[in-house]
Image (cartoon, rainbow, N blue to C red):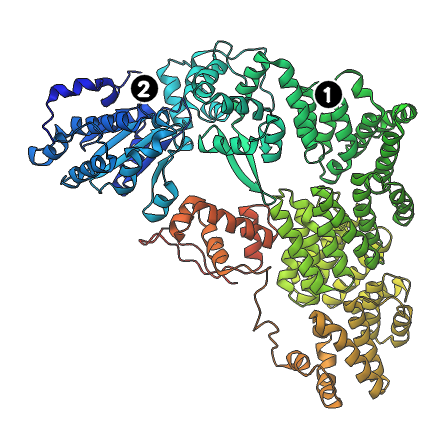
Amino acid sequence: MREVSSSADVSCPQAKIRPPKRNADTLERPRLEAALSKSTAAHRLTLVVAPAGYGKTALLADWVHGTGLPSAWLSLDQFDGRPARLFHGVVTALQSAAKNLSRSEGNALLALDRSLSQDPAESYDLVLSALERLAEPIILVIDDLHMAEPELAHGIIPVLAERAPPTLRLVLSGRCYPSIRLERLRRAEGVGEVQAGDLAFTPDEIARVASFLGHESEADAESLRQATAGWPVVVHEMLVAPVRADCPPDDRGNAVPARVPLADYVAEEVLGQLTPQLADFVLRATTCDRLDSRLAAELYGQPGGSMLLQECRRSVLFIEEDSCRGESHYHWSSLFAAQCRAILERRDPLLAERLHRIAARHYQDSDVRLCVSEALRGNDPPQAVASLGEHWLEFVLRNDTRALEHLCLELPGHWGEDPEILMIRSACRNRAGDTSSASEMKKRALAGLPALAPFRQRRAEINMGLFELFLMEGRPDLAAAAGEGRVLLEAADSHPAAHSTGLFLLGQAEMRLLEGAPKAVSLLEEATAAGRANHLEIIEVCSAAGLALALVASGDLRGADDQGVHALERAAALEWRSPEQLASVWLARGISCYWKDELSKARAYLAAALRSGTRLFPFGPLALIYQVLVDCATGNPAHLAESNAILDAVDGRGLFQGPLRAFRNLALAKVSEAKGDPDTAMRITRSLGPGGNPPLVDAFLAELLRRGDEAAAAQLCIDSLANRRRASFVDTNVSLTEALLAHGRGETAATHERIEHALNRAEPQSILRPFAERRGDLAELLVQHTAWGTSHQAFIAARTAPQVQDHAHHTRSYWDLTERELEVLAYMRSMMTAAEMAEALYVSVNTVKTHQRSIYRKLGASGRREALTIAVERGMFEGTASRTRPEDGHYDFTVNG
């Protein structure tokens, strides 16, 4: 070792070992400087990683100038990848900082040899030993670390990151993550990180930049932040140049000022710093903003596309990864991708067009919007028409015909007059209530159909037929529609999307007939499988939800609960954002809870079904009927008055047609009975007539007639149900009425035979409501039935126990919130953000958001406000949040499970 004189610093340019001086127009960013100070105080290693133009160097220079700790600085260039040169630069930087230390502390660093010995480990150990002698921490900032890749892994940087003593606080800054063992460090002691999201300008910072640049009127900082994602270099340039008047923002990138050479900046500062192979991949892969590994490989057209996609992630190239359906998907920054497309279109327009056509084919069945957009960019309207023609009914099921019509109107020239497109637009006009335009467009479409290829002609006829049978406004004859739908379904075998959609619509129609539950179950099971096999998310989700309702209608309450769980979990896996397609799950759950006598839960789920449903949800009237039955069961006067008013209001809109009319009259009779007006209840009941109604209606009527001392009429109702009582809750209801009628006639054996039959049907499905409704009449009979002989001793004991608590030993199920979810729900009552909740609960923000999504699914809520409303309705809160936060940072909430 030898003493190094100050003149030795000449061997390393001073610009490399001194932080740049602050420019007059550099924005001060105290929030980030504070974040750096906090990170370096808590971690030995801090990473500052972001693409070009995020102000990393300026921020670090300002922070180093302002920090009170001794600081060393080293800027790297393309020659610093060699271990010997990098070692020389690091030691020089440390020695430059050591001059400001006391002699006793700095001598060990100043004595280091800057040359890397033949045994690098020896030189590295000497540096570590010198750092151990420091009494106070020293900061070493290494900027532009990406310039030393890929040799970085073999030099001194990994040694300092992994083995340096706490007296060295290492800050590494660059455009990509360094090739050192980061995960090991993260797990062992933690690594501080400042990323692009942190470095992006906030609206307040944008406003300050705008003010500094002399903008007389206040700039729209939030709009500019959204347009640029806060990319500092772009924000600055857009503020100093006017936006082109002839360049409105499109759906994939915002307008860039005319004189801002942003594409040139990206070409030089981003793509120009990559290897030629990676730069070529980026230009191809940014053809569209969203992609997966398969599309990346298709766009690249050569082996290695998936590996290069991962290299983009490591290099922090304006790309984010998320998981959907168990697969990784990637999203480019819209602004960055738009510039890359501009570069490629300028360099090779034919290649750019061909890549758009590849993307369109990739999305033709999975994302019609993207397919149409890419097809039109690739000058391939036939591909756009094919995707629209195959999948337009899915837009109708989403209640999204505005977007569908907009896509049709985007088609160029004569393609807008294509017969299949005119058929689609006719359907859109019909859903919008413009029947005149719908009729005119349909005529034009029918005139042009013979000119289409046979495959397209048949597809158009099938899809329009399904629309007119099941989705068009004003089609009251559902039974006839179901019959015609079966014929169409047979013709749709060679059209997967139409066939899958037809299965769902026909299954839904069978359900709406209120007598076809077994057929509906079979059709919806097939539709669910077909939707999944053909990657038709809307069909899979709607069919899975509808299947839960079909199962509950068939009397399989347990199967319906399980299917509802499956539907919600599948929707969550698909990241489904439209709650209206899940309304059938909430209705099924509400019906199930009603028959299980879980009345508060039933009302909450039925309310969720009514909130979620749209005019395309055909079971809203059934949800209303069950809500009335729940209110009659609870006897809540306010709810009864509300139910009566709703029935009157809805009846005026003509929603109770066909079999639902009988349900509506039954509900009015039940309300009158619950309000203590048996005369009105019996008058309505008699008007329905015994028999000939839907099975559940006749089951309720039989009991109403029995309680009104009209045993003969009650028996007629029961006789009419001879072959229509398959559903467990219908059979249980009817059997108990039969038992009470037999008891009134003094027929003891028949009484107990019917009670045992009711128990046989009720216990496997936990059907409790029919017993609760007849509790007074059945109490003594059930006690006698135990002596008579039964296989259901425990079930009867629970029904006859004083102040029965059916769920005192409730087993937690999917539908119940977990302890952690209850805790998160409690915090949701406050004004705390997800980040603040995460800090209070000592979990990550992502964990809190996962719990929130689970809470929304289980409560049938679309967001935080609705979840809290439902929780209050269900009585899940015992207390309320205190208005001030306690010293320990936790609110005092109590939540009922």
Q: Please name whichever residue, 461 or 264, is drawn nearer the observer in this view of the structure.
A: 264
Q: Which residue is drawn at 68% across and 83% down?
A: 793
Q: Mark 1 points at which residue?
A: 380
Would residue 883 be seen by someone viewing this image from the given angle? no
Q: Distance between the residues labelled 2 and 1?
A: 47 Å
Q: Name the residue under label 2.
A: 26
Q: In this view, does 495 lie to the left or right of 23?
A: right
User: Mark 2 and 1 residues: CB-CB less than 8 Å, in contact?
Assistant: no
Where is residue 812 drawn, in percent x and y? Answer: 56, 65
Given the current orientation, which residue lies at the most extreme front position?
118
Where is residue 277 drawn, in percent x and y? Answer: 51, 23
In this rendering, the label closer to the viewer, 2 or 1: 1
Q: In this view, does 30 lie to the left or right of 862?
A: left
Q: Please name whichever residue, 576 or 364, is drawn nearer the observer in this view of the structure.
A: 364
Q: Is mark 1 on a helix, strand or loop?
A: loop
Where is residue 592 drawn, in percent x and y? Answer: 70, 62
Circle 1 residues within 10 Å: few <14, some 14–19, many ≥20: some
